[in-house]
Amino acid sequence: MAIVKVDISEYANSQPPKVRVWLSAVDKLMRDGNCRVTCSVVNNKKRTDGKFTYTSKRTKKSICIVNLGTSGNYISMRGNHFIHPNGKGNILDELPKDVFSFVIKGAGCELGNCLNLDYSVNQDNYCVHDNAEVFEYNGQKSHRCPHNGWRFELTETTNFEILSRWITLEVMW
């Protein structure tokens, strides 16, 4: 993947209007929130994708990754604000039941399991991305691989309001 200077609008143009407008607003929100954006472009026989990574300049932590292209249109959300709470709000308190269930089950690694079923570090199949971040919410234990996040498809029916709120909390964290 090559790092290039590409604006997200170049890839968002092919999206449905609702997705395109939301991507533009979120890009502005994160840039105004002191985030750095990097773009990698994958262009080969199998796929053509733009991958936009938004990182907080203050914390150096990834906020989210937006992927637009032939391998799918999705946003991969991070959970820094609820994994390492700082008292400025928590999206878990606001999520609809179906989204909450998806988030609380955890986000593992595609390359190997970061954790055993009891949430201890899996030494036999060590994650190449380091140890997963374990968190507890209302008595339920969950985890996130430091490389992966929670992936939401970007379609006309996506709950953009809740994703925008999540991003706002990540930017403030």
Image: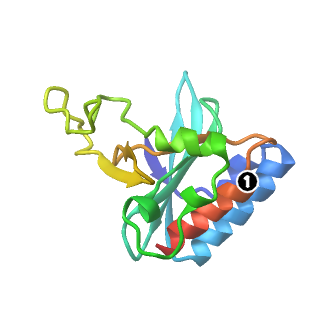
Residue drawn at (51%, 37%) of the image:
42
Apparent side of residue 121 relative to residue 93 in the rendered image (left or right): left
Q: What amino acid is at disc 1?
A: Phe
Q: In the picture, residue 120 is in which quadrant?
A: top left
For label 1, the crowd category at 10 Å Cα-Cα, with few meaning under 14, some 14 to 19 and many 20 or more, is: some
Report which residue position mark 1 lands on.
160
Extreme-front residue of the structure: 139
In front: 128, or 165? Answer: 165
Q: Quadrant of the N terminus?
A: top left
Apparent side of residue 135 relative to residue 97 in the rendered image (left or right): left
Apparent side of residue 32 relative to residue 109 in the rendered image (left or right): right
- The picture places residue 147, in percent across and down from the top left corner, at 36, 45
Residue drawn at (78%, 43%) of the image:
15
- The picture places residue 172, in percent across and down from the top left corner, at 52, 75
Dot 1: what SS?
A: helix
Q: In the picture, residue 111 is in which quadrant?
A: top left
In front: 167, or 5? Answer: 167
- The picture places residue 19, in percent across and down from the top left corner, at 77, 49
